[in-house]
Image: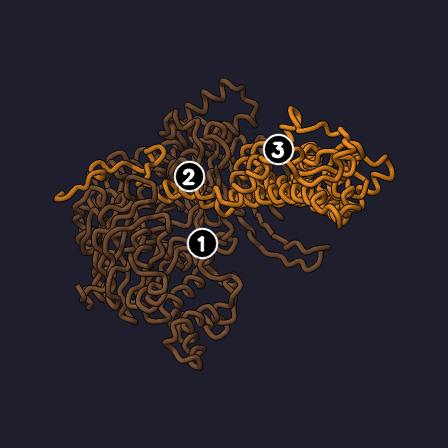
Chain colours: A brown, B orange
Amino acid sequence: MPENLLEVRNLTITPAGAETPVLHDVSLSLASGERVGLIGESGSGKSLTAQSVMGLLPEELHAQGQVSLAGHDGNLLDADERTMAALRSDIVSMVFQEPMSALNPLMRIGDQIAEVLRIHGKVPRTQIPARVLALLSDVHMPDPDSARYAFPHQMSGGQRQRVMLAIALANSPRLLICDEPTTALDVTVQRRMLDLIAERVAAVHAGMLFITHDLAVVAGVCDRVIVMYRGRIVETGPVDRIFSAPEHEYTRGLLASSDLEATDDHGRLFTLKTALAYTGPRMPTAEGGEGRALAPDDERRDPSPAQRTGSLRAARGGGADGAREKEDRAAPVRDSAPLIEVSDVSRVFRARGMFGRRRSAVTALGGIDFTVAAGERLGIVGESGSGKSTLLNILSGLDRPTTGRVRVGDIRVEAASARALRALRENLQIVFQDPFASLDPRMRVADIVAEPLIAAGVGQDERLSRVEEMLDAVDLDAKSLRRYPHQFSGGQRQRISIARALVNRPQILVADEPVSALDVSVRAQVLNLLTDLVDEYALTLLFVSHDLGVVKHLCSEVIVMKDGAIVESGATDDIYANPQEEYTRRLIAATPSLAEALAAGGRVESGI
Amino acid sequence: MSHRPTGAQNPRDAAGVAAPPATAAMAMGPTESRRSALRLNASMVIGAVLVVLILGLALVSFFWTPYDPGEIDPVARLQSGSLDHPFGTDKFGRDTLTWVMYGARITLLVGVVAVGIALLIGTPIGIIAAIFAKQPWGIWIDAVIMRANDILLAFPALLLAIVFAAVFSPGTGPAMVAVGIAAIPGFARVARSGTLQVLGSEYVRAAKASNRGAPAIAAVHVLPNIAGMVIVQASVAFAISVLAEAGLSFLGLGTQAPVPSWGRMLQESQQFLSTHPELALWPGVFIALAVLGFNLLGDGLRDRFDPKMEARGA
């Protein structure tokens, strides 16, 4: 046992006053220098496991079992706070999910790093500034010298997470625990961050426990994977084996649902339920698998190209092929006049100074041009800060453009009267990103979903029947009506959100990163649901995401945005296969995909 | 499939399962209910007990008091505590316990009316100001409302009451109204900040996107979500108005003779402070207990409605 860096045996955690444990009999070990991924959806107990190693378990949770760490005799679960404090950072340290809340907003980051060094006293005081500088340059902080004097809010999310990593590695711990360190970051930043973590951990020869719900992330950075499901470890093994031949149903399901390129016979994404038919990630080499996984996908797309075509007459789209569409149920305007027309739209925000002083202008959008035909599915892709949300707000009449024209249906949004805006909103509905923030915590589901109907003046009886019908359409049972949002999981809440958006039968559905806050397994279900509903209700879909994989699955056309401007646009498959712009290429490269990660992982291993 | 732990045999999709069981969502399951149980904290319990005690005194006084408050007994004047008069008697031989019980009525009446005035006027003002503050063209209206509010805030309640007493006649009514008006700014500020928070939330964006107008959003979304904050403010304002009433009555600007009031009892006991300090003690103690009770209750409620706690629980 002493040769193992971390040894967890029969760890069972029970909340005080509850009968059933939330963590059942978890045992795992981590050899010195080993990188292990701990995978599971939210609520599977992966964070609790990590917290018990750090001695950070909430007090109302009761832990039993044995946790031992090289360099400390005895059970960590019995250790008092003083012992734990000495161990933390020296032997084990942690990188948290949300770098903004994990850093002290009132302390310069150089001081925050120095604090860790000072407390543990490994480095002589006089050398601390030099060590801080070295740590910051180790994590590739741009301009580390001046970064020492910056406050957390002056940095981007990725930079803050670098600082977290520098703090975690300050005292050269032997074990680094990363709790979803990249979940809050943009795709492009995520990739760099992952590389950096892998690099630093290798450089200091530390072991790593990497917690995530995203399989594609793990594949790149870990040697071994532990899969957790509902407080138990269901499978453990080397990355290659887990990904190519998962033994447990749940692992298979997780694998299937995180692969956005594979679809089942009905052209739907795999979920935990349908995962049995999944054949594994499409490896560039494995032809058989590729053929089978791809075929249904093509089948689905081929018969109805016309239905999905839209003419994206943006920048270069030219009058594409949106001429003859099938008789669409919606869409009063068609062909010559697209449903949505955005021309030369810009939005400039002025920082509000008291009495009009010090007004600085921030251009959130500049010269946006695009059109969307009825029935089209348009993806809008870009990093945070690229102006996607501003664009959505303008389209939905929640904000007005500074210049330019926006037409949705017959309504000129930029100059719309209050009445016209009402009409617009009846026609265009939004599904918001965060299902935890977009539902009023004090309202029952029935009232939440009925809200658009009340606004539209629908009578009470009809309201109820339509709400019931809608909940049925999003696969929630009628019992949900009387419940409050906190009684639902993230995926269920997003279903409620979708039900609210569609209850008034809009023509256009705008989805603002609807799945980025969801677990991978739930993501596939919600995407399938969206696909079904878009077909069923003949919706025009605007789908905003930073995840190209999702967009590729769902959308026929795509716009790539950067810094408030459209960088590239066209048919999704074209853009994906043949990106013209450097930025698009970077986005595509950064999107974690199982196949690529595996291939990359294999390369590293063979290189060693 | 060598091993299949129970529960994982048929991997349910988490989104298809209503109300996740404890194991599936410990983030909000048992830990949360546990935390809310813990939130019944000491200050809230003590505060509630004190408030109930004062409330009880007032209620009982309607059915039974040891003596009639107007009953004068020249023989038994300025007595110390005894079996006949547990709290002693005053200079006219009136029973102090009876007066304390009757005084609780006035105290609560003033509190309820003053807080009612402040809550019913201040909260809508705050909500309206916040709604205007969110409109690009409305920030001036918000500024005007809130600056007017600040001016009112700068006016001491006592000064306002003195003005009221001078304009109308001194009495419980003008005192209550004056204290109530003086408490309006507190409610307006609390309501405004809470409303701004709610209006910035995504569910209000969703409501706007579903065509709900500002009044509907204020009623359906804002009010229920700021109710906790407003209740906390009400409890603290109650304590302040108890104190203000006592102070005004002490100065002769509040409740007038012969209606029993703690403030007036204090004032009347002044001349006997060196010889009979217990005359000042009892009303003083009950004023202190009432103020403490409502303040502790407010503190406890604040912990309970702490937005951070709520965010964690939501």
User: What residue does disc 2 label?
Assistant: A377
Which of the two marks, 2 or 3, is nearer to us in this view?
A: 3
Q: Secondary structure at mark 2?
A: strand
User: Mark 1 and mark 3: span between their CA atoms?
Assistant: 59 Å
Circle 1 residues within 10 Å: few <14, some 14–19, many ≥20: many
Which of the two marks, 1 or 3, is nearer to us in this view?
A: 3
Mark with earlier residue (1, 2): 2
User: Mark 1 and mark 2: span between their CA atoms?
Assistant: 20 Å
User: What residue does disc 3 label?
Assistant: B55
Q: How far across and how far down the image is residue B225, in percent? A: 55, 38
Using the rendered image, report if marks 1 and 2 lie on a common chain.
yes
Residue B44 against residue A450 in the figure, above or below: below
User: What residue does disc 1 label?
Assistant: A383
Q: How far across and how far down the image is residue B271, in percent? A: 80, 46
Residue type of the residue flagged with mark 1? Glu
Quadrant (top left/top right/bottom left/bottom right) for the C terminus of chain A: bottom left
Q: How far across and how far down the image is residue A109, in percent? A: 48, 68
Circle 1 chain = A
Circle 2 chain = A
